[in-house]
Amino acid sequence: MRGLKKAIFGTFLFLILFVGVAFLFNFDYIFKGIQSSYLQGHLSAHIDDHRFFDNRKIEAGQPQPWPQHKNYNKLSLTEALQEKNEEAGTVAFLIIKNDSIWYESYSEGYGSTSHTNSFSMAKSFVAALLGKAIAEGHIENLDQAVADFFPQFDERLTLRHLVSMFSGLNWDESYYNPFSMTIKAYLDDDIREMIMDLEVVKEPGEEFKYLSGNTQLLAMVLEKATGKNVSEYMSESFWKPMGMKEDAFWQLDSEESGMEKAFCCIASNARDFARFGKLYNNFGKWQGKQLLDSAYVAQSIRPQLEDYPHYGLGIWLKDFKGQEVFYFRGILGQYVIVLPQKDVIIVRLGQEGGEVPDDKEHPNDFYVYLEEVLKTLEAHDQENRITQSAVPRH
């Protein structure tokens, strides 16, 4: 009994010490992480965590429903794709071809209007806002200096460096160290203060390094250039004119600071996320109107560094079996994958995935979804050819 009392007393003292140290060294944001993840049964950020943070609404306008193909949901997914979706906790899976939904499935109680976290797909959407701001004259061009908006930054640093991930900033992009900048930005209550402390420590434009701080600084430039928060600018630039079905929610660092976590965290649904794939696949044109400059889109889906062919302007790039592919991705395997030559868009949202091997640039599951969807479509085409050849001709 005495031993038990000592153990309880020791644990109590440890907790007091831990809390005291956390507050002393400004690590108290960790408690928000415990509340929003561990106490909800998750080891890290999860697809439903917008409910535990302050959010700003991205307002939708008049919905423009996706057309459904005449053979909607008659595709038979390959066995490997079905197994992958089940084991990785896929909650939404769409195959869109020729601007119509061919296949759509949901699981675990999620549906076509369910809001889940975009994670880093948001970086691609912020990149679209940059293109919009340039077209509207709020920003001169991609090579305008960040110092024009925030004079404390190195004059060599440009907006192109931010959106293409070769800024040279001293941001720590660790997702598993609770004291890293990325974790602090996700959980703390004043993200602007963090960004203003960044410095250029390497020559901008020389080396690709994926940093969430780049996108956050870019969003702060957009705020200053447009005079609007990025949720409002996103709503008027894309959410309303593209006929999103639902309002979305963009996580804030806090209600007081009111800054969107621009590097992540737009809660929306698969059908609405897919519209960005269609917009880029159509070089910025939507329903006959040019929402995004076609030249900007063309640059976006081309490498910005000669020695790094995998990234454009906020968009991932890959050649796959003779197909040029571009895609948006989030840390748990959130994908909008576009195959322009086949006019195919794949959307996958789920609980697990997105792991990138140390010696690779693209996640393993990205290849699985590409490979198996192509097999699914090829099998469907083959079946149609057999059926048509069997029809008697008179």
Image (cartoon, rainbow, N blue to C red):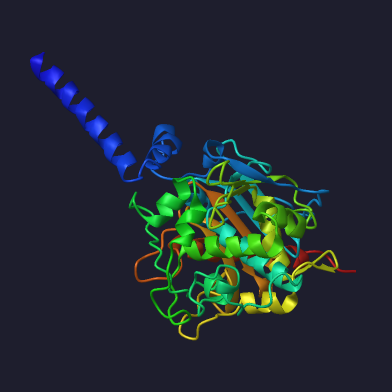
Would residue 200 appear left or right of 301 to someone viewing this image?
left
Q: Does 275 appear above or below 91? A: below
- Closer to us: 344 or 242: 242
Q: Position of residue 259 (x, y in %)?
A: 58, 50
Q: Residue furthest front?
A: 151
Q: Which residue occupies the foreground of this view, 196 or 388?
A: 196
Asked whether, in this view, residue 63 is left or right of residue 40, the answer is right
Where is the N terminus found, in terms of image quarters?
Answer: top left
Query: Does residue 143 lie above or below 371 as drawn?
Result: below
- Residue name at image x 9 percent, y 15 percent: 2
The answer to whether any part of residue 28 appears in the image is yes
Drawn side of residue 215 relative to residue 44, left or right:
right
**In the picture shown, does residue 193 fall above or below 204?**
above
Single out the residue that lies furthest toward the top.
1
Asked if residue 343 can be seen in this view, the reply is: no
In the foreground, 366 or 128:
128
Residue furthest bottom in the image: 306
Residue farthest left in this picture: 2
- The location of residue 12, given as percent across then percent down, is 22, 26
Q: Is residue 20 left or right of residue 129?
A: left
